[in-house]
Amino acid sequence: MKKTLQFITVVCTALITGSAFAGQFKETNANYVDQHIFPRTEAFAKEAFEFKETTIKACRLTGAQQQETLQKAFHEVVDTWQGIEHLRMGPLSDYDQMHRLQFWPDKRNKVGKALANLQKKQEAGEHIDEQKIAFSSVAGQGFPIFERIIYQDGEISAKQCEILRAVASNIYSIAKSVHQSWVDPEYGYGGEMKFTLAENELYTDELSVTADLFTNLWSALQWVEDNKIRSPLREDVKKAKPRRMENWRSSRSFKNISIDVAALKDSYETLLQNHVLNLADGAQRDTLILDNLNAASTISQELEKVKEESIKSETTWNKMLDMAVYLKEARGQLFAVAKELSIPVGFNSLDGD
């Protein structure tokens, strides 16, 4: 009986504290949706359209000019993709759209197998179009298969261009769908988070929205640390695996991390910074979070100048490890301030630290 009363007291205290904080997050949530999410998904959709159009035109070219045009378009659209990759809740989690766009890590070479399967269909006389791509293996629908073709040795064949056009069209369709699913005035995720829809099927109050956004931020930091940094580093420099790095074929692994960290820093500043500054020692806490994110960003930008193979050197390996440590420190500090702000934390996503 005593334990039951203690449990009820803890739950009631949490609910009272949470409800007291809930009101202050309403404007922040709306600003986050309007200023952080909408512009990024719109930029990605627009760039994906240009990417599709450029791919169609480039496939009329030949030789080095064709390859250079396709590679430039690839980098431009992946820049905007990396700017939204951290938004793993909402539309990107629907219909496996995250993996349809960027199937990675690919530890079993499923992208290579998907490409081989498409080529077999072409040899059998099948025409590969967007619909065929959309209903094929998830691994063969997005950026990795496109990258594999345009960064191969030798010229791009007409049949390979057929696959490139279909993949680029599929990427644009997904990008357009993701943006529309956020901004739709009647059914969009943005409206759910801002409580502007007639009915809200996802959230009960503003604090539950903030909790979702915070969990997404925290988990995205962990994703970058674990998959983009620690996985290729492994236990020591002698075991480092450059080909575990994201987009290593196009030599943009470190640039991806730079964009990721910048996007996550903007997430923090838009979603939480003002609330952190209102804490008793808020200025100090804010400085600690930003110092760690800025330190990680400085290293990643510096490493953009080197190739992925350099992680086999002690200098680059140690810098990457430092970057991972800074991101882990930032996560720890964010977790602590979330508790002080009475933001419910999703332990399924955050368990372990």
Image (cartoon, rainbow, N blue to C red):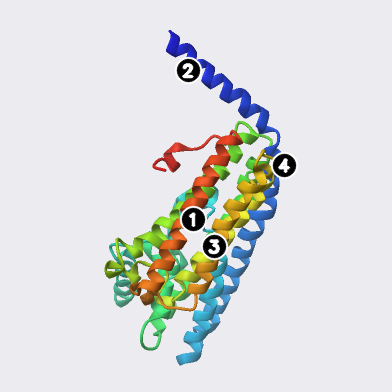
Q: Where is residue 235 in the image (x, y as percent from the top left)?
A: 29, 61
Residue at image position (48%, 15%) is 6
Q: Residue at x 52, y 60 (%)?
A: 174
Nearest to the observer: residue 305 or residue 33: 305
Q: Disc 3 and disc 1: Cα gap in Å?
A: 9 Å
Separation of residues labelled 2 and 4 (CA atoms)? 32 Å
Task: Specify the amino acid type for callout 3.
Answer: Ala
**Residues tagged 2 and 4 counted as in contact (Cβ below 8 A):** no
Q: Name the residue under label 1.
A: 327
Residue linked to disc 3: 295
Q: Callout 1, which amino acid? A: Leu
Q: Residue 141 is drawn in which quadrant?
A: bottom left
Circles 3, 2 touching at the beta carbon (< 8 Å): no
- Taking the spot 59% from the left edge, 64% from the top edge, the residue there is 44
**Looking at the image, is mark 3 or mark 1 nearer the viewer?**
3
Callout 1: 10 Å neighbours few (<14), some, many (20+)? many
Label 3 neighbourhood size at 10 Å, few (<14), some (14-19), many (20+)? some
Measure the alpha-carbon separation of dots 3 and 2. 42 Å
- Whether the residues at callouts 1 and 4 have beta carbons within 8 Å, the answer is no
Residue 338 picture location, percent across and down: 57, 39
Give the labeled residue for mark 2: 7
Relative height, residue 39 to residue 283 (above, below): below
- Which secondary structure, mark 4? helix
Q: Which of marks 1 and 4 is nearer the N terminus?
A: 4
**Which residue occupies the extreme right position in the image?**
27
The residue wearing badge 4 is: 27
Between 149 and 263, the one lying in front of the other is 263
